[in-house]
Image (cartoon, rainbow, N blue to C red):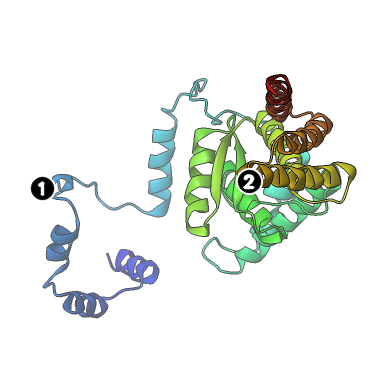
């Protein structure tokens, strides 16, 4: 039993003195009281486990091999991205299984990280050469994490202060969920949909905004001069009307409305065309009545 105790101490790292000190700091007498306080009661078995006698490493491997022989391989219908893939042998052997990067170290040595990093940099270099990209990512985990890393990379290197990140609705649900989780603390807004449709919608909005800006922002073009001249004439017409100066006010209004009608036609704005055309008709009707009545 001493060998098993030595193994546990070597890998867990805590001795009884360390455990007692931690429990005393937390206010518990023993590990059982601590476990009952922090773990839900319904997960406790309430009785001792039936355990086999301890085995040596060789005996444990043989027992596990017998259990593994009972496994049967079936076709997976899980979907959602969890399906079999083909890894080219050249990548499998020279990147993922390169003995030069792994067999030099045991799995628990920190130095094995150097072998993993070397495998990653070679994989990134290979992908960069194949795709022609200046940089290629090599996520340490899965597709979802790779997508999150791509999002944060795009955010860091972008010169724009925008925080909106568009995600294709065809992405797998787990990928979208990881993106949402990663985006929240970074203040990134996730918008899910069809990128092509969203791009078309944004383009339309952009063009509409451009048209509006062209109409309200002075540019010293022909329509700008006509617009302001007509506006001043209309103000003069209002002043004449307020002082009951007839029929000059009607003539002045006709000139101002005529100028705005020209601008409306230059802008191809139907609502302004209708308003000014109706306004001209009303003023003309007033003049006719004035002279016929006079």
- Give the residue number, with chain letter if any, for mark 1: 47
* Dot 2 alpha-carbon crowd within 10 angstroms: few under 14, some 14 to 19, many 20 or more: few
Q: Residue 67, can we see it?
A: yes
The picture places residue 126, in percent across and down from the top left corner, at 81, 49
Q: Nearer the viewer, residue 109 or 79?
A: 79
- In which quadrant of the rendered view does residue 293 lie? top right
The correct choice, above or below, for 83 with respect to 55 in the image is: above
| Observer able to see residue 139 | no
Using the image, determine if residue 92 lies above or below residue 117: above
Q: Secondary structure at mark 1?
A: loop
Q: Quadrant of the image for the N terminus?
A: bottom left
Picture disc at residue 243: 2
Image position of 149 with respect to 81: above or below:
below
**Which of the 4 image quarters holds residue 33?**
bottom left
Residue 63: which disc?
none
What is the total number of numbered labels drawn onto the structure image? Answer: 2
Residue occupying the far front of the picture: 294
Question: How far is disc 2 from disc 1 in space, using C-alphas?
Answer: 102 Å
Q: Is residue 78 left or right of residue 44?
A: right
Q: Quadrant of the C terminus?
A: top right
Q: Secondary structure at mark 2?
A: loop
Q: Position of residue 51 (x, y in %)?
A: 22, 47
In the image, farthest residue toward the right: 222
Nearest to the observer: residue 98 or residue 155: 155
Give the percent coordinates (x, y) of residue 102: 64, 58
């Amino acid at each position: 039993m001493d060998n098993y105790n030595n193994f546990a101490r070597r890998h867990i790292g805590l001795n009884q003195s360390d455990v007692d000190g931690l429990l005393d700091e937390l206010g518990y007498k023993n590990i059982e009281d601590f476990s009952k306080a922090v773990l839900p009661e319904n997960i406790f078995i309430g009785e001792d486990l039936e355990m086999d006698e301890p085995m040596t490493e060789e005996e444990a491997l043989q027992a596990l091999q017998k259990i593994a022989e009972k496994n049967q391989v079936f076709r997976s219908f899980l979907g959602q991205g969890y399906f079999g893939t083909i890894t080219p042998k050249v990548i499998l052997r020279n990147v993922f299984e390169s003995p030069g990067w792994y067999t030099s170290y045991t799995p628990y040595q920190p130095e094995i990280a150097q072998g993993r990093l070397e495998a990653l940099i070679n994989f990134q270099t290979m992908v960069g050469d194949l795709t022609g990209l200046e940089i290629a990512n090599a996520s340490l985990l899965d597709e979802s994490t790779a997508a999150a890393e791509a999002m944060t990379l795009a955010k860091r290197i972008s010169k724009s202060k925008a925080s909106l990140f568009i995600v294709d609705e065809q992405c797998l649900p787990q990928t979208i969920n990881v993106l949402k989780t990663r985006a929240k603390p970074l203040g990134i807004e996730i918008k899910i949909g069809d990128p092509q449709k969203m791009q078309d919608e944004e383009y339309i909005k952009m063009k509409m905004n451009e048209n509006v800006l062209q109409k309200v922002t002075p540019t010293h073009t022909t329509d700008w001069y006509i617009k302001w001249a007509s506006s001043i004439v209309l103000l003069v017409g209002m002043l004449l009307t307020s002082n009951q100066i007839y029929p000059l006010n009607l003539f002045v209004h006709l000139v101002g409305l005529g100028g705005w009608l020209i601008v409306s036609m230059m802008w191809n704005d139907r609502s302004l065309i209708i308003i000014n055309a109706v306004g001209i008709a009303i003023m003309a009707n007033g003049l006719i009545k004035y002279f016929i009545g006079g």
